[in-house]
Image (cartoon, rainbow, N blue to C red):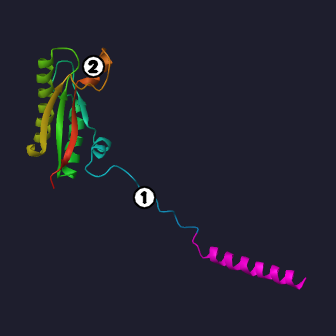
Amino acid sequence: MKKIALFAAMAVVAGCASTEEVADIDTTAEPVIEKVGPAPGSQQALEASAGHRVFFAYDQHTLSAQAQSTLRQQAQWLNDNPTVAVQLAGNADERGTREYNLALGSRRAEAAKAFLVGLGIDSARLTTVSYGKERPIAQGSNEQAWSMNRNSTTMVMGSGG
């Protein structure tokens, strides 16, 4: 019986020691949570903060007010990431010949580039390419798909820093 009492007493003392150790932990402290987001200067960061695509009306390469707004945001992002170079890819919908759409895509990419240069972005950081109707982002032969495919897409090409 004495052995059982001694064992019980030791268990109580051990339990107290554990409680004291737990009491030393600050349970009111906020947990440390790291925010995980896109890497600075990445394509994902551009898309999240400024958008990467502007759209055009049928058979046009003039920038709408919405396109200009997006390009202003891109210019700010480029100013905040001064070592990043981008490529502006002009695209067209499926209507028209391959040659015509390549030329139209080129005019769209150049219009976006000229606007960014006008906002102070160094033209050496901007390249253009036209894919015409070869790289649609929306499938279908209807106005909804066509309107999505008439665009200039800005793609991060890397850092020069």
In terms of sequence position, does the residue under pointer 2 or pointer 1 come before the other?
1
Q: Would residue 37 be found to the left or right of residue 131 on screen?
A: right
Badge 2 amino acid? Trp
Q: Nearer the viewer, residue 75 or 134?
A: 134
Q: Position of residue 86 (x, y in %)?
A: 18, 42
> What residue sits 22% from the left and 52% below the top?
80
Question: Quadrant of the rendered structure where residue 141 is?
Answer: top left
Residue receiving disc 2: 146
| Whether residue 32 is situated above or below residue 76 in the rendered picture | below
Q: Which residues are magenta?
A: 1-26
Indicate the amino acid at tag 1: Glu
Q: Residues within 10 Å of mark 1 (few under 14, many from 20)?
A: few
Mark 2 falls on what kind of element? helix
Residue 114 appears at what percent x and percent y?
A: 10, 36
Marker disc for residue 34 = 1
Residue 73 included in the magenta stretch of the image: no
Rendering coords of residue 14 (x, y %): 72, 79
Q: Residue at x 59, y 68 (%)?
A: 27
Q: Is residue 158 above or below residue 11?
A: above
Residue found 31% across the figure and 44% down from its top: 44
Camera-nearest residue between 14 and 112: 14
